Image: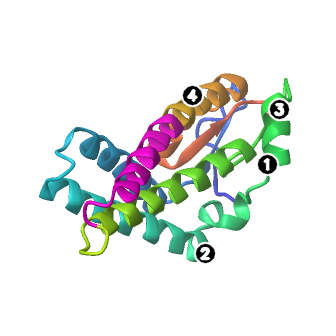
Amino acid sequence: MAKQDTSDCGRSGARTLAVWDPLVRLTHWSVALIVLINSFSDGEGDLHEWVGYIALGLVLLRLVWGVLGSRAARFSAFPPNPMRAAQHLLTKGDKHIHLSHNPAGALMVYNLWLTLLFISATGYMMGTMRFFGVAWVEEAHMLAYNWLLLSVILHVGGVVLDTWRTGVALVPAMVTGRKRIPEGMEAE
């Protein structure tokens, strides 16, 4: 169970729960920064390549942490389930707060990780003798990057939508590691 901080319960009845550990937050914001850097870097330069390797390392670290990490970081806290994700998106007035990722967010996280792994694999392939200059590898790399950008836009939109629906400020939670749960909301 998440640790509860009752220091801000006061008159509002809200409570703050520790959710995201430092490693989750570090990998999240570092990968976001890396995607931004690589979006503006020379795709054939050393910076692009090294930043890509760092992104791969961070994703692999996060995947290991999905098995060994804190409760909210573990894959078991947010299993991929398309039916639950659709239900979550279509249910109005849901008063349930997911301490880890909600079902739609879980699918997005897995999508982002798989996309980043695919981009890393095709990027690596483009630097090998066997696949250097091979059109389909370069096209797959660019298509995956475009999918990543679309996914990031949908991810940010989902964060805004879920914050509006639940009243839980998700961006500050990913900065501080603590979710502030409004009065009358149930937390999982």
User: Which residue position is annotated with label 1?
Assistant: 82
Side of 36 where 90 appears, left or right: right
Mark 2 crowdedness (10 Å alpha carbons): few <14, some 14-19, many ≥20: few
Q: Which amino acid does label 3 sit on?
A: Lys
Q: For this view, does 102 lie left or right of residue 110?
A: right
- Per the picture, the main secondary structure of the magenta-coloured stretch is helix
| Amino acid at the residue labelled 4 | Gly
Asked if the magenta segment contains residue 166, the reply would be: no
Looking at marks 4 and 3 on the same chain, the residue that comes earlier in the sequence is marked by 3
Label whose residue precedes the other's in the sequence (4 or 1): 1
Badge nearest the viewer, 4 or 3: 4
- The residue identified by callout 3 is 95
Local SS, label 1: helix
What residue did someone put label 2 on?
67
**Residue drawn at (51%, 50%), measured in percent from left and top?**
177
Distance of label 1 from label 2 (alpha carbons): 21 Å
Q: Give the range drawn in magenta.
A: 132-152
Whichever of labels 3 and 2 marks the residue nearer the N terminus, that label is: 2
Give x and y (percent) for residue 34: 30, 50
Residue 133 seen in the current view: yes
The answer to whether 71 is drawn above or below residue 152 in the figure is below
Residue behind mark 4: 157
- Secondary element under disc 4, as helix, strand or loop, is helix
